Image: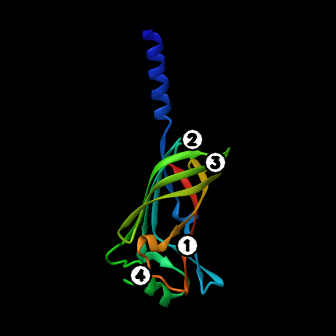
Amino acid sequence: MKRITLTLALLLGLAVSAQSTWKSDPAHSKVGFGITHLMISEVEGHFGEFDITATATDTFEDAEFTVDIKTTSIDTDNSRRDDHLRSDDFFAAEKHPAITFKSTGYEKTGDKTFKLTGDLTMHGTTKPVTLDGKVNGIITDQRSQKLKAGLKITGTVNRLEFGVGGETPTLGDEVAITINLEMAQQ
């Protein structure tokens, strides 16, 4: 009985130690979004400053994510619109300098797909969200000899639930999120 308990403890220790830290490579990653404008077109943008860290296995399973996005780094290719989005009318970037996400659950849904649940905080409001994820691939980087993973995470949030902007016929309520990541194992 002691031998079985010891074996199980060792196996559990190996499973826990198989988790490692992964960091996003900002030069090869993008945090993007899209929103309907005038009910006829979609305006896209991205945030240029972000930090995304994950703890996951070598096959990027059982991942836990922490995300920090700087609201002042919003970029929609229109400086006047970007300034308006940073204002109190939308993100209130001075009062709320970051959008954060902390995962609370991971569910494998396919060979390379998963559901990621967590708490999203935006404009001072925290709500649970569920995002869809896909592992595009994992390779060993020839230079660093460390693992790199490519991921795509998508989802939709209702901006009004977070107090971002008011009700208006010119903007859709739903915001599509697309995060393309290249993560490097640390």
Between marks 2 and 3, how big is the CA–CA gap? Answer: 8 Å
Please give the residue where the numbered disc 4 appears in the rendered image: 86
Q: Give left or right: position of 68 versus 183.
A: left
- Where is residue 183? Give x, y as percent: 55, 54
Q: Give left or right: position of 179 versus 136.
A: left
Residue nearer the viewer, 13 or 38? 38
Please give the residue where the numbered disc 2 appears in the rendered image: 58
Q: Residue at x 49, y 29 (%)?
A: 14
The label shown at residue 138 is 3
The label shown at residue 68 is none
Q: Are marks 2 and 3 in contact (CB under 8 Å)?
A: yes
Q: Nearer the viewer, mark 3 or mark 4?
A: 4
Among the 4 quarters of the image, the one containing residue 125:
bottom left
Between marks 3 and 1, how big is the CA–CA gap? Answer: 32 Å
Q: Residues within 10 Å of mark 4 (few under 14, many from 20)?
A: some
Q: Helix or strand or loop: what does disc 2 sit on? A: loop
